[in-house]
Image: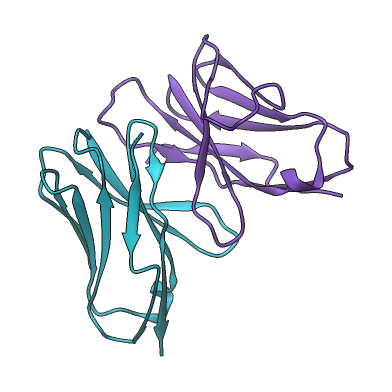
Chain colours: A purple, B cyan
Amino acid sequence: GAVVSQHPSWVICKSGTSVKIECRSLDFQATTMFWYRQFPKQSLMLMATSNEGSKATYEQGVEKDKFLINHASLTLSTLTVTSAHPEDSSFYICSARTAYTNTEAFFGQGTRLTVV
Amino acid sequence: KQEVTQIPAALSVPEGENLVLNCSFTDSAIYNLQWFRQDPGKGLTSLLLIQSSQREQTSGRLNASLDKSSGRSTLYIAASQPGDSATYLCAVPNQFYFGTGTSLTVIP
């Protein structure tokens, strides 16, 4: 299957700093990428959907100025958590899909963010 | 907005038992449904993808069915093994809303 690489796999940062997470599709062109967060013992919650070259569409309750998403190319999307706070500590996962709506999505391995 | 529910939330079975995990969704206008496995603290492993035109999909000891009209999918695991212990998630497009998950423990 196709490979989605997410980096870093874990990161610790201080409160008030910003953290960037990268999501790359290694062997296919991802026209659409999704970003999720997962709290302990909970399911994945969709944060936003991004299409290459367009502004991301955020789910209700997700602050777009805090979680900046850039999908500048067909193989790379980034999520930047700005002015991070301890409550932003979570597991963040990206997924990528090609243009066809009936294809499966491929997931990165996730990033464990801890804000201290 | 699509809502996805999984029952049961947790399941504990002895090794060798066959089991069924359930997934229900509110909007039946889906293109496909995907089942995943997640080990603690890890990312997702895709298990099966069922297209809307299909009713079943099989991979090894796993069999997934899809009934769009009733908004349901089931994941059947045959002859369960301790290594099957994980959380199982179903997800529906286009945004891949995830179900609440079923935490499976297979007891040796």
| Residue found at x 18% / y 47% | B71
Horizontal and vertical percent position of residue B35: 32, 52
> Which of the two residues, A46 or A53, is positioned nearer the viewer here?
A46
Horizontal and vertical percent position of residue B25: 27, 46
- Say whether residue B60 is visible: no
Instruction: Please indicate whether residue B45 sits to the left or right of residue B43 in the image.
Output: left
Vertical comparison of A31 with A111: above or below:
above
Horizontal and vertical percent position of residue B10: 41, 73
Vertical comparison of A47 with A44: above or below:
above
Vertical comparison of B9 with A36: above or below:
below
Q: Quadrant of the N terminus of chain A?
A: top left
| Residue found at x 41% / y 90% | B108
| Residue found at x 45% / y 29% | A27
Number of marks present in the image shown:
0
> Which of the two residues, A88 or A31, is positioned nearer the viewer here?
A88
Horizontal and vertical percent position of residue B37: 41, 59
| Residue found at x 43% / y 19% | A31
> Which of the two residues, B7 or B20, is positioned nearer the viewer here?
B7
